[in-house]
Image (spheres, helix red, strand yellow):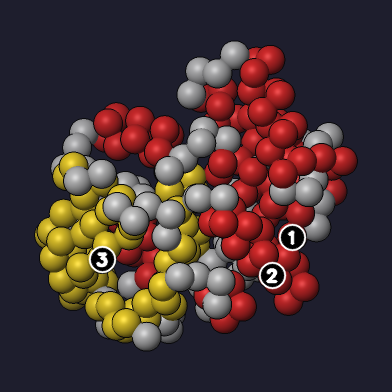
Amino acid sequence: MSKLLETKNLGKTYPMGEVTVEALRGVELTVKKGEFLALVGPSGSGKSSLLHLIGLMDTPTKGEVFFDSQPVSKKKDWEKTALRLKKIGFVFQTFNLLPNLNALQNVEIVMRVAGLPKAARRQKAKELLDKVGLGDRAKHLPNQLSGGQRQRVAIARALANEPILILADEPTGNLDSVSGAEIAKLFHQLNEEGQTIVLVTHNQEIAGQAHTVINMKDGQLEDL
């Protein structure tokens, strides 16, 4: 597998009152195309900070993130936004669905931002909901869906612009064990189809689906 993402000496510090917290310390990470990588570790170990940096939602204090061998951390904000929109899909613990839009419209929204015509994005949103097993819930608002169903909508939305990388931050954190197992199975299926996935999780079942599991401790990586 060829290299998709790489970090070099990646560091991130945050000011906390009169002290500075070192969230990441010299992280060296490589993600290959088609890989399924899970980041595990205790709260405060730097997992989400790392995910935000490789997802271009934050800027490192030191070091660099390389995407397809190109440095991206110091790009202009609009360039990062364009790269995220075209190349990266995000799945969050809290789903981040728009409450006033139904499932179909929530999946459509990122394609609308990307400029896809209405008919094309409507058709693709339907196909993606079918893919995650929610074709019969297209008209339901988020508050009419279970937690597992809402996360499936979020995954469909993450796939909408055909990203080459999916980043997921505790995607089963708000779900019961049965729904969590279903989401784990869905991620496994997506990876089997060739999707590159990096996720943060405390769930051993979903971590067990990954090719590579990396433990984080005190802002650094430790291979398991």
- Residue 224, image x and y in percent? 37, 85
Q: Residue furthest front?
A: 1
206, 53: nearer the viewer: 206
Tell me the CA gap for discs 2 and 3.
27 Å
Disc nearer the start of the sequence (3/1): 3
Q: Residue at x 27, y 53 (%)?
A: 3
Q: Residue at x 76, y 54 (%)?
A: 149
Pointers 3 and 1 in contact (CB under 8 A)? no
Q: Quadrant of residue 84?
A: top left
Q: Which label was assigned to residue 148? A: 1
Residue under label 2, please give it.
Answer: 180
Disc nearer the start of the sequence (1/2): 1
Q: Neighbour class for label 3 at 10 Å: few (<14), some, many (≥20)?
A: some
Residue 73 shows in the view: no
Q: Residue at x 62, y 49 (%)?
A: 155
Q: Neighbour class for label 1 at 10 Å: few (<14), some, many (≥20)?
A: many
Q: Residue at x 68, y 31 (%)?
A: 125
- Residue 196, image x and y in percent? 45, 53
- Residue 55, image x and y in percent? 36, 50
Q: SS for tag 2?
A: helix
